[in-house]
Amino acid sequence: MTKFMRTIVLAVLASMCVSAVAQNVILHGVYQTSRDDEYPNGTYSEYVGFSYVTYKPIFIVQQGLYKMEWNGSTLTMPVKDPAVNKADFSSNGQITNEAMAQWATNFNMMYANSGAVIYNGVLTTVMSRTDMDPNSGAQVVPGNSVNDTTRFAVRKWNAATGDLISSEIRPAWDCLESAGMAVNPKDGKVYGLFHITNKYLPDSILNDPDFFADEAADSTDSGYAICTIDLDKMEISQITPGLYYENYVTFAINSEGRAFAMTSGGATAALPSADGKVYDIDGNPSGAHCCEFDLKTGLLISDNRMSTGYCSQVKRQAACFSKNDPNKMYWMGYYNSGMGFNDYGNWMPLNDKQWKTNGKYDTSLYEVDITTGEATRLANVEDRYLFAFMWVEGEAEPEIEPQGLRGDTNGNGTIEIADVTDLIDYILSGGTTSIDLANADCDLNGQVDLADATTLTDYILNNQW
């Protein structure tokens, strides 16, 4: 082999090695569901003993923190991380370590069917629940509306150890159900796509005849809104009303501060082609949409609504980005839309009782290219595991970029009348004078104008934004 050819071969091998390393990723997540016919309700639960300290039974459950690895060709089965080992706290049906036994059984409260997020080392999980009549066991429906009976169980956990920190029940009007939550590295805030009910929308919206133009005339459904959330108070602040009515199933923010959500794709989608994807009449990918939202306005960026080519189900799923590749989103979702061929060869909803053989609840790991929206199914997930929240190893929380001081237009570290003067000078001069433009956007609308001077003056007079 000539020296030239040897150089070419080595270069090719090197590029292959780099490619393989780039594809390797370890994903962590908060358990949402897996199914197994051998256990009640399709989920694993093992009684391991009775605690005479808390006077409660101790169980090992499937809920918890998990990890799995994609090496570019195969996906490992999700395993608990940290692991839960019965031998560490139980022997012959007796509890041998009360603290560890309680730690293990606390995972039965780690439900996140309404979203989860990690911030400052704390994992917050939100579970929507419905009140039941204590006597009959029937659902309580005071006003014949789910909003009258739904409550939210909010739990805080140590994200590294899984220790339960706190647990509380929040009312329905807190509107904590979300398609997902994520931290924006650009401003350090936690955002989410929250489900806002009509009864909480302002009259100016509800009385607008154009608001429900795309909905049925008698629609009393709910919409999604981009919101920020104060995790200490568990209070959301809407950036928009509940404008969006698609079945959103994920929400994630990349390292550039761009926010994306996935729709389910609908259960009435066309039959999949030989490659497993669905296409429209023009041969373009259809199915679930990858949608981008503007976090400043809370509005959907209309030209960034892209089709993945796959259909999923109307159930919460998980997505995340690696900081090393802001254009690649990992999506852990369902394998199909819940549609399939029945015994008679008809395309229709799959039988729920036959889910283990018909694949109704099978799950997969996908890679979504946000520049095109198209997805690639990397691998099926063993035993149908599904996460409610997911992150790349070592990246549970993004690196927050240093922030300026809102209103400090001259950059001297304080907010005072001189900042207002400098801001007005900048505006009147047509931008020929110099100010800190990031700090000058006082009303946070993405522009610097006289409205910012008014907002800054109000802040100096009232000491609040």
Image (cartoon, rainbow, N blue to C red):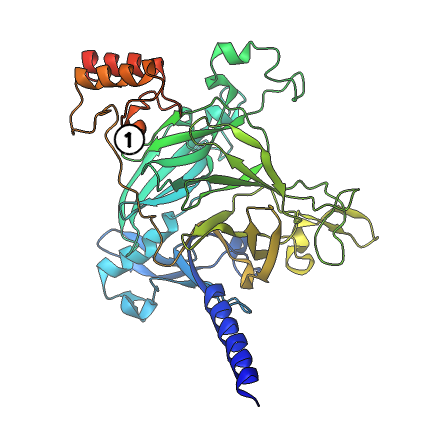
- Where 233 falls versus 101 (above or below)? above
Outermost residue on the right side: it is 344
Residue 101 position within the rendered picture, expressed as x and y whole percent measured from the top left: 28, 59
Q: Is residue 243 left or right of residue 309?
A: left
Q: Is residue 204 visible?
A: yes
Q: If the image is split into quadrants, where does the C terminus sit?
A: top left
Q: If the image is split into quadrants, where does the N terminus sit?
A: bottom right
Q: Secondary structure at mark 1?
A: loop
Instruction: Give the camera-side residue of 35 and 93.
Output: 35
**Residue under pointer 1:** 233
- Where 285 falls versus 298 (above or below)? below
Q: Is residue 153 left or right of residue 410?
A: right
Quadrant hosting residue 50:
bottom left
Residue 428 position within the rendered picture, expressed as x and y whole percent measured from the top left: 32, 13
Residue type for callout 1 = Lys
Residue 285 position within the rendered picture, expressed as x and y whole percent measured from the top left: 70, 46
